Image (cartoon, coloured by chain):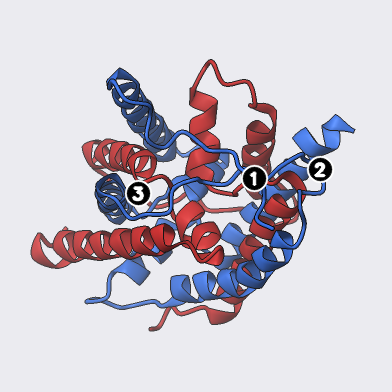
Amino acid sequence: MANFTPVSAAIGGALIGFSAVLMMLLTGRIAGVSGIFAGLLNFRSEDKAWRIAFIAGLMLIPVIAGWIGYGMAPPKLPANWAVIVVAGLLVGFGARLGGGCTSGHGICGIGRLSVRSIAATIVFMVTAVITVAVTRHVLGG
Amino acid sequence: MEIISRIIAPLLCGLIFGAGLLVSGMVQPTKVLAFLDIFGAWDPSLAVVMAAALAVATPGFMLTRQRARPVLAGQYFLPGKSEIDAPLVLGAGLFGVGWGLVGLCPGPALESLATLSPGVVVFVVAMAGGMILHDKWQASRPIVPRDAPVVRAADG
């Protein structure tokens, strides 16, 4: 557990929870990122402004952090492009089919005590742990 | 006033959400994968992030439920389904495999676009492709799309 960072994790988590509550309190919307993003991909949908505004807020943070001297390092991703493409497809398709992702089910749904969200979170945690176990310890990637 | 409900409030929420992801380190796939790697050098940080988020969100949502309607909107927009069904389990399962392959989920992926990392751009394009594929597939089926949002008035 050499890399365990409980203090920053707790502060960051509290901010995420606060954001989800504020979103519900002010706009009545769930701060589920996959649902917010997916609504932008449907060209007939008309309620795009709030979705663009939320995602713009997300994307502005690394820029603002850079200005004040806490620039974000580009994420470390697998060297194999095929893995990135397959992972992206699975995350997008799975989030839609399952009706949410880590934020929508894991934070907002469980926070609302939704049995569906608790089940979804357990399922994606288990398949993610198995995937990492297989790629790192079985295939040795 | 509409600019507050449609732009400023969601922008503010996105900023706070993004700050939380950045501060907690959850924008870094290495940090996420270290949590998921329970057979390796396990890093429980993600569990603390979720616990802290829920410690705020659970009582927070209970308080919002006291209000008949949101501050800036006419009604709440909540999912209408409550039962666990096959699409939920299958979808969450596939999502977890993709998440475990690279350590990115939608929030951190979109936030990381700001770094202009080519890998993140490819991931987000593929993620959008997966979503469009799903929605087209659902639309091609004879029944009503199963996850169409159901708008309902707040409880109570």
The kind of residue tagged 2 is Leu
The image quadrant where one finds the C terminus of chain B is bottom right
Q: What tint does the image give chain A?
A: red
Name, please, the residue furthest toward the front: B156
Q: Which residue is mark 3?
A: A77
Residue beneath the point at 38% across and 29% down = B145
Count of numbered badges drawn on the protein = 3
Give the x, y percent position of residue B19. Answer: 66, 57
Residue B145 appearing in the image: yes
Per the rendering, the mark at residue A29 is 1
Q: Is residue A11 left or right of residue B123?
A: right
For label 3, count other residues whose C-alpha is less than 10 Å away and answer few (under 14), some (14-19) or many (20+): many
**Above or below: residue A89 compared with residue A44:** below
Give the x, y percent position of residue B94. Answer: 25, 47
Mark 2 and mark 1 on one chain: no
The kind of residue tagged 3 is Leu
Per the rendering, the mark at residue B72 is 2
Along the viewing direction, whichever of B17 and A98 lies nearer the viewer:
A98
Chain under numbered label 2: B
Residue B19 appearing in the image: no
Give the x, y percent position of residue A133. Answer: 19, 66
Along the viewing direction, whichever of A49 and B60 lies nearer the viewer:
B60
Cα separation between marks 2 and 3:
40 Å
Q: What tint does the image give chain B?
A: blue
SS of the residue under disc 3 = loop
SS of the residue under disc 1 = loop
Mark 1 and mark 3 on one chain: yes
